[in-house]
Amino acid sequence: MFNALSPAPADPIFGLNAAFAADDRPHKVNLGIGVYQDEQGRTPVLRAVRAAEQRLAERGDTKSYLPISGAPAYGDHVQRLLFGEVQDNARTAQTPGGTGALRVAGDLVAQTAGPTRVWLPSPSWANHQQIFAAAGHEIQTYAYYDPARTGLDEDAMLSALATVGAGDVVLLHGCCHNPTGFDPSPATWGKIADLAGDKGWLPLVDLAYQGFGEGLDHDVQGLRTLTDALPEVLVASSFSKNFGLYSERAGALTMVGADAARAELVFGHIKRAVRANYSNPPRHAEALVVTVLDDASLRADWSAELDTMRDRITSMRRALAEQLGRTGRDFSFLLRQRGMFGFTGLSPAQVDRLQGEHAIYMVRSGRINVAGLNPHNLDQVASAIAAVL
């Protein structure tokens, strides 16, 4: 069966991580994979999560299956973070990470409406295309980033979204756009909602970084603009980043309908898609999130640590922009970006030189994980970037 296969290409993110691990140079720096790192370069277990794990170890008395859509309390907490309160016209299914939520969304649309066009911003997260292609959809792109302006090209984006047909799906990054870090303004979110309503396409909001932009509530204002204005919105969200639960795969797919009956109708088909895929979600991920968010003290500690992580990323972004500004080039655009990633504008050739000559690893698009910077490697990274400019 497999005699004719050629080697599969390496994943652009995890393949880079493997190359970094194999590099024996002691001064190597990994700015590729998107995980939070502290000033010592570690990806820590958050204090509230560690406390929750201790409680679960003491009281855990079952490893039985969860329902297909996960624990109801988990879905309620997801909705409170997204919308401020549980919504009568929304239903949430727990999924294995945000990636799992995106794939379930792709399967849901394919199984209920048939394969359609899924529109991705240009550029977008590298895995988006293969997720929706694997679900059978045709991939299209819409304008988003303008390298000449080093920012969001609002006019080109809105013009492109005006051409999207009824029944198509448009993927929108809810905040902290990956890879560019540039997000629509509140006014632009209103224009996007108007276009979706006028043209009849379905927004699918990928919200992987809530809390890493400006704060938990601020980062969902664009999403709330859409759900306030439109009859149907899908939301893929994740606790990988803001809870540090990368390996636990804690995600969710939320359907917001015109009313409770429509949401429940679609929710039944979401559960069918889940059952045919992974059957039901992992219990430990759900239990950690619910334990933290059910307890006022743990929730406050989690929120405070999330603020600390966001502030550290912001300080590293500012420090890098200042150091690179000394090269005589303007890097102030880095300060307009939000979230974990920075879009440097470096070319693939310059990125290759950074890896080969300086042991600095980043994605070939020039995207860096700003959380990978710390006071110990900042000078090295800035000097290396200056050397390849």
Image (tube, grey):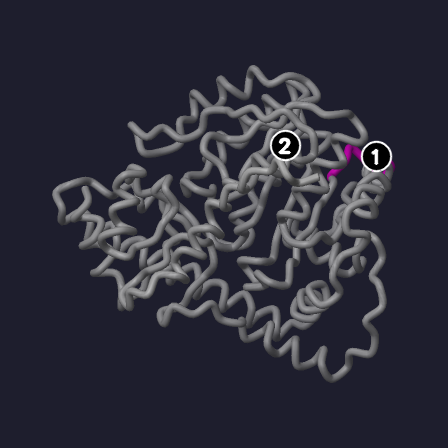
Mark earlier in primary sequence (2, 1): 2
Q: Secondary structure at mark 2?
A: helix
* Kind of residue at badge 2: Ala
361 left or right of 113 in image: left
Residue position marked by numbered label 2 in the rendering: 133
Locate residue 112, reporting x and y percent: 81, 29
The single residue placed furthest to the front in the displayed view is 3
Query: Which residue is at a point 54% across and 30% down the rendered structure image?
Result: 120
Q: Which residues are magenta?
A: 256-261
* Kind of residue at badge 1: Arg
User: Image quadrant for the N terminus?
Assistant: top right
Locate residue 343, reporting x and y percent: 35, 42
User: Image quadrant for the C terminus?
Assistant: top left
Q: How many marks?
A: 2
Residue position marked by numbered label 1 in the rendering: 262
Q: Are marks 2 and 1 in contact (CB under 8 Å)?
A: no
Query: Which residue is at a point 53% across and 32% down the rendered structure image?
Result: 189
Above-or-below relation of 168 to 48: above
